[in-house]
């Protein structure tokens, strides 16, 4: 049975302290149909030398200046030739060494347009903090995103043929729109029912929480309408405050 090629893309800038763990998580996969791509933003901290030391694992890589995270992601999309694209950025990891093989085994003969799963949060030492605040539903559709980004960007794979470029007009929340558009274009969506990624807490969006939320509100307004978006933010806000109060994190 033919198996899909998974194009895993890592975006990095001055990530010498975080990139090796990400590379190791790809290298240990017991699935060999992987195209691994690294897009480096012209790092000056030794990241490029680290990539060169791991070139036997990396299928393709570039190091050049970019216009921000999502511009770099678009470069990665342009380099991908696999059946699916999957962003595992510097500091993030695939959940364990059997994750990809188990995920593919669950697909059967008919490959869906979108595959998704769950996410666990980790700290800078790779220790698990806990599950992600938002949980993926049993069946995911684009309208579910009116309740927020229910699936982590690191735990969604999109068929390359329907993957659009990121909207670089957004600096912090273009991944939300990208996932939303992928779900809108998808003819079939598959729940892997497994943990797919380990997400490093404290990324770009969390560091810019207010502008990121403003961007996400604007995207939701465009796709779902202003009044429905305002109405949905009441329960979203209440759930957020309850979670922070109980878990002391967000």
Image (cartoon, grey):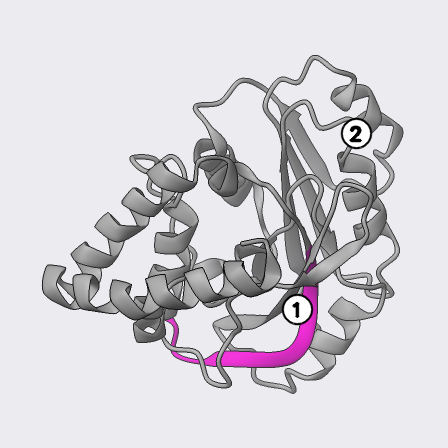
Identify which residue is drawn at 62% across, 79% down.
Answer: 192
Please tell me whether residue 23 belongs to the stretch shown in magenta. no
Q: Position of residue 188 (x, y in %)?
A: 44, 80
Query: Mark 1–mark 2 contact, CB under 8 Å?
Result: no
**Residue in view at x 67 percent, y 41 percent:** 37
Q: Which residue is mark 1?
A: 4
Specify start and end residues of the magenta stretch as a single range: 185-198
* Vertical arrangement, residue 68 with respect to residue 155, above or below: above
Quarter holding residue 130? bottom right
Q: Which residue is mark 2?
A: 17
Q: Quadrant of residue 31?
A: bottom right
Is 193 contained in the magenta span?
A: yes
Q: Quadrant of the N terminus?
A: bottom right
Q: Is residue 158 visible?
A: no
Instruction: Residue 175 in the image: state x and y as whole percent.
Output: 43, 50
Q: Is residue 116 left or right of residue 239?
A: right
Q: Is residue 95 above or below residue 47?
A: below
């Amino acid at each position: 049975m033919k198996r899909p090629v998974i194009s895993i893309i890592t975006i990095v800038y001055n990530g010498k302290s975080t990139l090796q763990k990400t590379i190791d998580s790809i290298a240990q996969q017991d699935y060999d149909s992987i195209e691994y791509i690294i897009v480096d933003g012209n790092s000056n901290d030794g990241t490029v030398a680290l990539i060169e030391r791991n070139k036997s694992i990396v299928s393709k890589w570039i190091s050049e200046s970019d216009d921000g995270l999502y511009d770099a992601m678009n470069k990665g999309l342009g380099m991908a030739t696999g059946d699916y694209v999957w962003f595992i950025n510097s500091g993030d990891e695939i959940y364990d060494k059997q994750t990809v093989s188990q995920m593919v085994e669950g697909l059967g003969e008919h490959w869906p347009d979108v595959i998704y799963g769950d996410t666990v949060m980790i700290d800078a030492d790779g220790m698990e903090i806990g599950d992600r605040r938002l949980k993926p539903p049993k069946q995911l559709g684009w309208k579910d995103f009116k309740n927020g980004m229910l699936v982590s960007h690191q735990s969604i794979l999109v068929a390359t043929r329907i993957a659009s470029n990121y909207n670089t007009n957004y600096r912090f929340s273009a991944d939300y729109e990208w996932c939303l558009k992928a779900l809108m274009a998808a003819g079939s969506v598959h729940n892997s029912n497994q943990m797919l990624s380990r997400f490093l807490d404290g990324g770009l969006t969390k560091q810019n929480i207010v502008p990121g939320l403003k961007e996400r509100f604007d995207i939701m307004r465009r796709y779902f309408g202003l009044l429905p978006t305002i109405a949905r933010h009441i329960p979203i806000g209440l759930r957020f405050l309850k979670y922070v109060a109980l878990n002391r994190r967000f």
